[in-house]
Image (cartoon, helix red, strand yellow):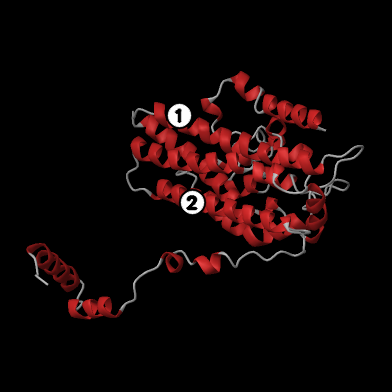
Amino acid sequence: MEITVEITDRLYKLEEKFAAMGQDINAYLDGLLYADYLTYWDYIHLDTLLSLQSPKTSFPDEEIFIMYHQITELYFKLTLHECKQIAEHPALTSYFFVSRLKRINAYFTALVSSFDIMVDGMDKSQFLKFRMSLLPASGFQSGQYRMIEIYATDLIRLVDKSKREELKDATVDEQFEYLYWKFGASELATGKQTLTLQQFIRKYAKQFLQLAKDNTETNFAAIYRKLVEQGEDVKLVEDELRKLDLFVNVEWPLSHYKSAVRYLEKDPQDIAATGGTNWQKYLPPRFQKRIFFPFLWTEEQIEEWGKTWVMNVLKTYKISK
């Protein structure tokens, strides 16, 4: 085999690279000689991935339920990958910000459009049975989703609506005590924290609080304000932030609402969620008015936040019955 100029040039460059690190190129070339060829299944750990479904019952559709939630968490991980790039960028520009926001919105496009798997993709009678084996676990306990919220906005925007005005000038520690989701997993009769919420707080509270403190100046809302102050063109940034606001605070929770209406609505009294959450009040955006970037919306848009969407969902599913 002829040793071409291109091969020789690459060898010289490799030798320079390894020499700069005090390494012997010959040892690395030996490693290449002995290494096996990489396969697709080894690279993505396919066998491990396909072994991670462990149903608690014998109902076939429980595997659908497990796999869909695992897929969801992988999309959340992709989103957090972009969030970290944005927050940690040493010299962020509107161009970089927009490019990463577009990626995040693409992930949520896939998430929202795929949720019909949960809405219509399982047998209702099977779901209502196997769900009882999941107590007190709940999708409410998705820590990655809460991290996405923290990266996206000022913490005051995640405070329960009834406390936002009172705590607008409070410390991060004080605001953290009144995050909206802490009120979404309380026992319906007593108002006490459910076991679901207690477990969640024990596992994630310190991590969430530290993340909020670390990102007071690097959450998406804060970054937007800095770009405006620097005189950058933020038109495309605003477009992507609005899309993200709608995805996370309207379309994603309402996809869950559709599923809840499909599986849990029942006359004369609705079925409680596995985590004990009051889904009728917790999921609809018009009740929580959870908005990451209120400065990008008109007063009328804020007042009507998610209302039309909810009414259409209820109308559709009541008619289908």
Say if mark 2 contacts mark 1, CB within 8 Å: no
**Above/below status of 142 relative to 13:** above
Position of residue 96 in the picture relative to residue 318 (left or right): left
14 in relation to 290, above or below: below
Q: Is residue 32 visible?
A: yes
Q: Is residue 103 left or right of 93 when viewed as pictured? A: right
Q: Position of residue 263 (x, y in %)?
A: 79, 44
Residue 72 place in picture, x, y as percent:
59, 51
Q: Could you tell me the amino acid type at mark 1?
A: Glu
Read off the residue under disc 1.
238
Q: Which residue lies at the image location 68% right of the left edge and 33% below the top edge?
A: 285
Q: Residue at x 58, y 45 (%)?
A: 171
- Identify which residue, 258 or 205, lies in the foreground: 258
* Badge nearest the viewer, 2 or 1: 2
Secondary structure at numbered mark 2: helix
Image point (41%, 46%), residue name: 86
Circle on res. 78: 2
Left-right relation of 99 to 67:
left
Q: Residue furthest top?
A: 300
Residue type highlighted by circle 2: Leu
The answer to whether residue 292 is seen in the rendering is no
Q: Residue furthest left?
A: 5
- In the picture, the quarter occupied by the C terminus is top right
Quadrant for the N terminus, please.
bottom left
Q: Calculate the distance from the C-alpha at mark 2 to the C-alpha at mark 1.
A: 22 Å
Along the polypeptide, which appears first: circle 2 or circle 1? 2
**Circle 1 sits in a helix, a strand or a loop, which is it?**
helix
Residue sitting at the far right:
268
Place of residue 235 in the rendered image (x, y in percent of width and height, measured from the top left): 40, 26
Q: Position of residue 243 (x, y in %)?
A: 52, 32
